Image (cartoon, helix red, strand yellow):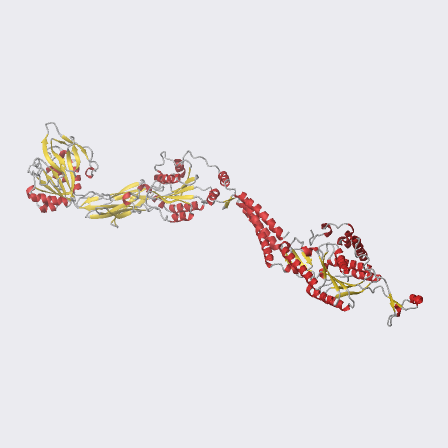
């Protein structure tokens, strides 16, 4: 129970008056000299006790009368929750706390937590509060609750900001969505942030908070900042052993409001400092550092580039992971070998796949009758170029090789026989026959499967022309990756066991078309061989908050367990968080506040209105005064019986 | 309604009609002269009797008897001797066959009044009226006053100056302390050599059993006894309303109570007490008459006459 006019409760002190009178002015009753009190002394004792009891009941009644009158004047309300509403003009508020990387700047997050605690201190009874945290993404730390202890516990759990980056808009949108289902009409959002400019991205549009939602931005950032950031480390995720790699490049940026003229940059490989470099940033805010160290050897390398010389060290390192792999072993079975390059079936293929030091492939050539099981087992990919047919033993070994995980590329030509091949069991389609088109007529590649990894890095335009092609009949489990302009398959793909088989409808030399002369020939072969060798490179660098590394909340290098293998990956912060340029809280307010917001009536007016609304259905004072009347009657009866 | 603080009994009681008004205690209380008060009371009482069967009943004439040896020569009627030459002894006027002794309780409890006459004043009025009335009938009347012991003693005589003496004595009565009627009454019994009528005027609030036992002894000695039990109206009906500290007039013992809460129990106690007093008196052959100080005093005179009529 609470009271609309609680000051009247001081009147309860008046209840002490009867007690004081009883205790202080204990007047002796009038004396009566009586003839004999012998008849009085013999009255039953219980009557005397009852009389004393009556006196105490009278005293209690009088104190109770005064107390009830005081209660009536204090205008009590029974419903405590309603009373809370009245007392505090309760609100539904969402406290949005920026916990992105930039909040790690010296003392900023501590200031935000202090402001949050002040916010909690000023809560009124009945206020329901939710807390939203802007970290890797906007998340609800605590849903609406009116328990200060729960809110304090939630705040205490925020020991340090995250390394993530998320926009102010995402947090405000989440808070706005939560307020839509809030209890009270008095709704507000309080944002504690350093108001980093990059965090305000997305607020310049038409999005606004819902009408009626008040917004209070509180700036906890510092005006003058000094920051150096390694915004990029340029190094390929995968290297091929033996191929000369590019040097490691790092881009250093000064992004604070105060310039940093000199910085020290270090390159760490597997945790050891390999190289240091001094950076002059006198006239520029960004500079690229090229390290002389060249990655070599095989296996995985953990790379860190670290810069020193500023006050904000949280973004001073950037990480990269590099895997150095051996070359892909490719065995080319040349079905039409010739000493003349223009007649040699494998000439163009070997030119494209290369056998030099810069090639990622190690190509070995042979002819069908020299194809031995040992040769097959020593490579990752076998390429059959215009091979007429293989022996049963060779076909069986080749089939086992594919099922065990090997790759097979079959490019039929004029030497290749149609149906009845010993490799029919593993080929993705059946060779129906080849047709030579009329002079002047040709087939072109009209369509290909853009979602297939083989074509992920290939350009869209294909301009090869073919005067003769094989007609392929795909098997049920085969995928048609390329089609000619007559919709006939140009490239079939099938998974056989753990390996893969690609079947083309044309040879890979220039006898039936000009495909080897086109720019796409080389990347097509490289992607095909990599695809068959199952050497698809996985991303080795992530920004914190990415779904693949959602479990990791700190920047650095970590081992990621993939389905196929375990791999070192680098997790870096969003470079946008390192840009400490700020926007004003007022601009954020202007950007998000809804122009349809109606001005709330003054708190006193709202309180008075609510008092009337709450009190009207439960006029307790009426009942209390009725009770006072009854008690007065009882008091009169008892006092008449007791005293007069 | 009388109370202990502001009570006027005369205002609360309806006035009696005619001559009986003179017996009203409130009227009698306004008469300072005790003789006049007694006369007013008796005349009023007698005028109210009209053709009373008791009229002339008590008239006795002086007589002569023959002289006997040993008689005091002062009592010889010499004039008669001159005429008749015989010696006759003149009998004294007080030598009647009715001798009354009025025993008045003057203890502290008799001073209580709820308004108007106190029990003691009422008793004095009754005693004076009875004395006047008895003397008027040529009977001898005496008086003792007592509280816990005998205070005043006036032998029974029938001469007119004796009445004045008695009334003067009554005007000089002062309240005593505690009550012990048995002892003074015992002393009285020792002085009564002839058959007498003892009129005890008392509230009997202390030692009523011993008192009645003494009265029983008086009866055994051949005396007639009338107990005029004087009680205040407030004592009989407990007409108090306000919580008060009641103080015993004799023992000074105090008792705080609320009348409303104890009234029923009090009245039950009083009625039991009165009934027991009456019962004990009747058992002892003692006439008992309860007198309320708020009532006219004719009850006392009626009680006397009633006893006289039965051939005392």
The spot of residue B21 in percent (x, y) is 77, 51
Q: Residue A8 at x, y = what percent?
A: 55, 45
Task: Count numbered badges in the picture.
Answer: 0
Question: Can you give x and y, in whole percent of width and height, for residue B69 in the image?
Answer: 87, 72
User: Residue lying farthest bottom?
Assistant: B69
Residue B86, quarter of the rendered image: bottom right
Q: Is residue A267 left or right of residue A485?
A: right
Q: Which one is in front, A337 or A54?
A: A54
Q: Which residue is most to the top?
A: A440
User: Which residue is more in the foreground, A446 or A327?
Assistant: A446
Residue B218 falls left or right of residue A500: right
**Rendered view: A553 above or below A349:** below
In the rendered image, residue A382, in percent from the top left (x then y), is placed at 12, 42
- Up the image or down, A596 lies above or below B232; here it is above
On the question of residue B297 being in view, the answer is no
Q: Residue at x 69, y 58 (%)?
A: A33
Return the residue nearer the eye: A644 or A467. Answer: A644
User: Does any portion of residue A548 appear in the rendered image?
Assistant: yes
Quadrant in the picture for residue B291 = bottom right
């Amino acid at each position: 129970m609470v009271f609309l006019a609680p000051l009247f409760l001081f009147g309860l002190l008046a209840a002490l008056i009867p007690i004081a009178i009883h205790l202080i002015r204990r007047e002796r009753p009038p004396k009566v000299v009586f003839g004999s009190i012998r008849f009085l002394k013999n009255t039953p004792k219980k009557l005397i006790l009852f009389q004393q009891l009556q006196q105490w009941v009278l005293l209690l009644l009088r104190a109770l009368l005064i107390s009830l009158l005081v209660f009536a004047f204090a205008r009590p309300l029974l419903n405590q929750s309603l009373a809370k509403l009245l007392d505090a003009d309760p609100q539904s508020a969402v406290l949005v706390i920026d916990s992105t990387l930039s909040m790690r700047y010296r003392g900023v997050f501590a200031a935000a937590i202090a402001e949050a605690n002040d916010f909690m201190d000023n809560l009124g009874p009945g206020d329901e509060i939710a807390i939203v945290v802007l970290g890797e993404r906007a998340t609800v730390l605590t849903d609406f609750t009116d328990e200060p202890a729960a809110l304090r516990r939630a705040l205490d759990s925020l020991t340090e900001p995250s390394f993530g980056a998320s926009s102010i808009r995402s947090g405000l949108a989440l808070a706005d969505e939560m307020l839509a289902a809030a209890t009270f009409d008095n709704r507000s959002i309080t944002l504690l942030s350093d108001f980093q400019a990059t965090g305000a991205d997305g607020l310049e549009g038409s999005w606004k908070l819902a009408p009626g939602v008040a917004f209070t931005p509180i700036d906890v950032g510092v005006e003058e900042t000094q920051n150096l950031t390694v915004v990029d480390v340029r190094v390929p995720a995968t290297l091929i052993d033996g191929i000369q790699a590019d040097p490691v490049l790092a881009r250093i940026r000064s992004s604070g409001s105060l310039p940093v003229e000199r910085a020290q940059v270090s390159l760490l490989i597997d945790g050891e400092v390999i190289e240091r470099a001094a950076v002059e940033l006198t006239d520029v805010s960004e500079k690229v550092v090229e390290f002389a160290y060249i990655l070599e050897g095989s296996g995985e390398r953990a790379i860190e580039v670290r810069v020193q010389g500023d006050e904000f060290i949280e973004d001073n390192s950037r990480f990269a992971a590099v895997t150095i792999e051996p070359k892909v072993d490719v065995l080319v079975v040349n079905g039409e070998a010739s000493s003349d390059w223009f007649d040699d079936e494998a000439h163009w293929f070997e030119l494209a796949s290369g056998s030099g030091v810069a090639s990622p492939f190690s190509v070995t050539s042979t002819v069908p009758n020299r194809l031995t099981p040992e040769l097959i087992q020593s490579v990752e990919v076998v390429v059959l170029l215009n091979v007429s047919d293989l022996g049963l033993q060779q076909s069986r070994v080749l089939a086992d090789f594919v099922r065990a995980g090997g790759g097979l590329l079959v490019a039929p030509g004029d030497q290749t026989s149609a149906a009845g091949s010993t490799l029919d069991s593993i080929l993705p389609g059946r060779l129906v026959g080849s047709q030579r088109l009329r002079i002047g007529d040709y087939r072109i590649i009209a369509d290909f499967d853009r979602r297939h990894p083989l074509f992920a890095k290939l350009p869209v335009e294909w301009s090869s022309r073919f005067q003769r092609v094989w007609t392929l009949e795909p098997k049920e489990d085969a995928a048609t990756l390329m089609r000619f302009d007559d919709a006939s398959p140009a490239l079939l793909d099938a998974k056989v066991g753990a390996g893969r088989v690609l079947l083309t409808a044309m040879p890979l030399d220039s006898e039936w078309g000009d495909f080897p002369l086109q720019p796409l020939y080389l990347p097509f072969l490289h992607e095909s061989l990599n695809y068959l060798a199952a050497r698809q490179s996985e991303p080795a660098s992530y920004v914190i908050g990415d779904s693949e590394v959602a479990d990791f909340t700190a920047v650095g290098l970590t081992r990621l367990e993939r389905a196929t293998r375990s791999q070192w990956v680098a997790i870096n912060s969003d470079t946008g968080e390192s840009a400490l340029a700020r926007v004003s809280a007022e601009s954020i307010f202007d950007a998000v506040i809804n122009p349809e917001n109606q001005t709330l009536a003054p708190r006193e007016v709202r309180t008075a209105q609510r008092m009337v609304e709450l009190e009207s259905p439960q006029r307790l004072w009426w009942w209390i005064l009725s009770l006072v009347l009854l008690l007065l009657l009882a008091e009169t009866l008892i006092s008449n019986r007791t005293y007069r | 309604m009388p109370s202990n603080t502001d009570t006027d009994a005369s205002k609360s009681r309806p006035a009696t009609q005619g001559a009986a008004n003179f017996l009203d205690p409130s009227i009698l209380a306004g008469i300072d002269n005790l003789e006049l008060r007694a006369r007013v009371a008796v005349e009023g009482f007698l005028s109210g009797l009209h053709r009373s069967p008791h009229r002339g009943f008590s008239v006795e004439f002086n007589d002569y008897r023959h002289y006997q040896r040993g008689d005091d020569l002062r009592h010889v009627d010499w004039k008669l001797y001159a005429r008749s030459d015989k010696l006759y002894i003149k009998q004294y006027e007080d030598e009647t066959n009715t001798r009354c002794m009025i025993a008045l309780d003057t203890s502290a409890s008799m001073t209580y009044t709820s308004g108007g006459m106190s029990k003691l004043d009422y008793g004095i009025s009754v005693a004076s009226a009875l004395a006047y009335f008895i003397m008027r009938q040529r009977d001898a009347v005496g008086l003792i006053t007592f509280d816990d012991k005998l205070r005043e003693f006036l032998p029974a005589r029938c001469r007119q100056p004796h009445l004045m003496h008695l009334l003067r004595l009554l005007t000089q009565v002062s309240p005593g302390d505690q009550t012990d009627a048995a002892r003074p009454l015992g002393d009285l019994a020792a002085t009564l050599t002839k058959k007498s009528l003892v009129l005890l005027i008392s509230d009997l609030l202390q030692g009523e059993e011993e008192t009645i036992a003494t009265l029983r002894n008086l009866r055994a000695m051949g005396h007639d006894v009338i107990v005029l039990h004087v009680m205040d109206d407030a004592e009989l009906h407990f007409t108090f309303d306000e919580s008060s500290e009641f103080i015993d007039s004799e023992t000074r013992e105090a008792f705080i109570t609320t009348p409303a809460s104890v009234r029923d129990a009090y009245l039950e106690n009083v009625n039991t007490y009165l009934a027991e007093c009456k019962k004990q008196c009747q058992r002892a052959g003692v006439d008992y008459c309860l007198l309320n100080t708020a009532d006219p005093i004719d009850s006392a005179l009626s009680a006397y006459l009633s006893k006289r009529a039965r051939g005392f």
